[in-house]
Image: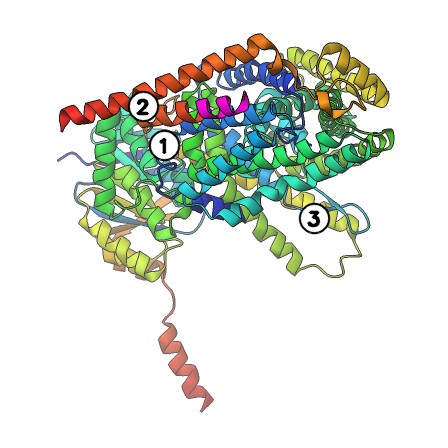
Amino acid sequence: MTPLIEVRDLHFHYEDGTHALEGVNFVLNAGETVALFGANGSGKTTFVLHLNGVLHGEGSIRICGIPLSKETLPAIRAKIGLVFQDSDEQLFMPTVIEDVSFGPLNLGLSAEEAMAQAKAALEQVGLDHALNKAPYHLSAGEKKRAALAGVLAMNPEILLLDEPNTFLDPPGTNNLIQLLKSLPQAKLIITHDAYFAAAVANRAVFFEKGKLVAEGTVREIVERFDWNYPDFAADLRYSAQRRF
Amino acid sequence: MHHVHVDAWSRGASVLHRRDPRAKIVALIVFLVVLATTPPNAYVTLGIDAALLIAGILIAGLPLASLLARAMIVLPFSLTFGIISWLAGDRWRAIGLIEKSYLSTAAVLLVIGTTSLAVLINGMERLGAPRMLALVTQFLYRYLFVISEQAQHMRLAAQSRQGDPRVHRQGRFRAAAGALSILFARSYHRAEGIHRAMLARGFKRQFPLLHTLHFRSSDAIFACLTAAFLILVRIQ
Amino acid sequence: MHIPDNFLSTPVWAAFDAISVPAVAMLARRASRDLDESRVPLLGVMGAFVFAAQMINFPVGIGTSGHLVGGALLACTLGPAPAALVMTAIIATQAFVFQDGGVLALGANVFNMAIAGVLAGYLPIQLWGRGDRRKLAVFAGAFLSVMVSATLALSELLISGIAMPRPVIWMSFALFAVSALIEGAITVAVLAAIARLNPSFVRKPGSSSGRALAALGSAALVLGVAGFMIASTAPDGIERLGAQLGLTSKTHFHAPLADYTVGFLESSWMRRATAGLAGLLLIYGVCLVAGRWIGRQRSA
């Protein structure tokens, strides 16, 4: 089976010369959900922006077997959808329905078809009551779901999510976890949240200074790089004992 | 922010709310032109115009007192010039200025209270406004409150760290300039992020059109009858 | 500076609507060169930024503070034509959303602030924005952008016949001049801060398209100066000028009120024409209602 994402030796540096990515190799197969860990500035978002051609580095990228190039960009953007960290950057149209229809319309669907697909996507995320609402009036959780709907409406095969549970409260995060688990697409999720990752992902990778340095299960990566909060409950019990 | 209320007004479901924005724009323009060309002492005409506005406000289910109060925003300007005109001997102009500018403002409020701005801009575009201008205005409105909130937070943060406001005026001036430059940079980066989000969902060079406006015969009837009524009342 | 409706006489607001419509259409076409709409987010967000920026207080004196208007700042960061388009969007939003400025008066307000103001403001920057006198050029540009808009507004009001005794005119000018100076100071400070964050945010003036716009800017400046000179001979000069051109909406400064006219709508052919138009609209409307009713009867 062809991997959905195949990245070989990806290099990228910014205009001022800073190296953002150095020789990244990565593979994503159908049905997988991979968590992407790493410190801030380690290149996670930069890497993900290469996968749909927003940034252009050196190296080879194949999406669903198609090599990424200027000519194949439209086809690739139909197959891989990116949910940005800031929902306000993603929901830029005046109403939810106009925003979710943006993607399908760009794919060449007629207005009726685009609207139908948009409505279906909004039903999938549970926002079919919010069609004509302005994004400003949505809660953080609703905005994230609307952004996801905007991507789902294009029927992609791969979902990329950049720290999706930022700004979400615990119920919002739980809803998101349930929603993501119900989606059949392969997913690559940038996150700092070990618990969130453990709930949705079956594999994890770790970025460090522009390099992909480790792969494994979520638990392996978290333990190896100490990528979690200390056990506060245990600390509190210990300090309470000390006082008495 | 007061506009939160007007924004809420525009989400009603009355007969007026459901009219196509193009019909409402045409009716508004006719109203404003008729009003502009009405002599200030034509009390019957002005009275009927005012009555029509009030009827519209009631039919739309908008809070009458709030709307009439909000329309008073033009009064400082018109009262100032009105008083100057009155004192210069031009009494009718003074009266005309005050009564007509108030009615115009109320009319605009009625339209904006029954039409969300996004829909209004769509309507103007279909009536011939340049597409680029319509798109820029849509985006401006979309991010107006987001960025204003950011500015508010910066103001609060600055105020929280402020000592005696009488000292360091120059320092505060420079701090305000610095705050604006940061707001500028954040806005610029936000615009870049939006552009990336557009590209990610297949944007090539032009925004796609989703035809959400449908001009029905009820809209035509509304526009024609309102316009005819206003013109006939004017030329009596 | 935003003129509400019913301040300007009909010929004045109508004339400026007629001027602004093609002018804005041209600006819109320029901004979307080759039908490329990818700059829309930047222009829209910058417009929102200017709106938000107007909330920030800049302390300037005993208990007073100034605010940024933004025309010159936009011109220095986006270029003069996109800046004018963004200002147009701002003025339109202010008129409808905040009832700041009239709807029929949009043509005049857009001309004053978005077109003449921005272009006149860009002129010094185009000429001197590169060299050592950069800061002075920006200050002069911001000053002019406010001064020219305000002067034009004042002239339009006077030509429309709004009474303004001399002291009031001079006081208005003084206030405009103060706002213009504040705008200069704020614009220089903010632009310097922006350039410190990232030099590429500030455009390099003197590009090829600049020359045509500089010419327009000069025209705007001349208009502004002319407006100043006219206003300074007011009210008598203005009255005479307005009356001669048939622009004023009254016959004489201290006229008795019995004969109050409102310009061309009172001429007989115009009256008949509008009556005819109203009649046609009424008939059309009635036919639509009847047609709908008949259609409903048939399908029932």
Is B230 one of the magenta-colored residues? Answer: yes
Q: Which residue lies furthest to the bottom in this view?
A: A244
SS for dot 1: loop
Residue A244: horizontal and vertical position, in percent? 44, 91
Residue at 54% x, 29% y is C89
Residue A69 badge: 2
Cα distance between the residues tagged 2 and 3: 46 Å
Whether A232 is drawn above or below C278: the answer is below
Residue B188 makes an appearance in the image: no
**Which image quadrant for residue B184?**
top right
- Segment tinted magenta in the rendering: B227-235
The residue labelled by disc 1 is B19
Q: In this view, does B138 lie to the left or right of C89?
A: left
- Image coords of residue A211 (percent x, y): 37, 43
Q: Which amino acid does label 1 sit on?
A: Arg
Q: Name the residue under label 3.
A: B175
* Direction from residue A236 to residue C144 in the image, left or right: right
Question: Residue, x 81% and y 24% (percent of image)?
Answer: C254
**CA distance for labels 1 and 3:** 48 Å
Marking on residue A95: none
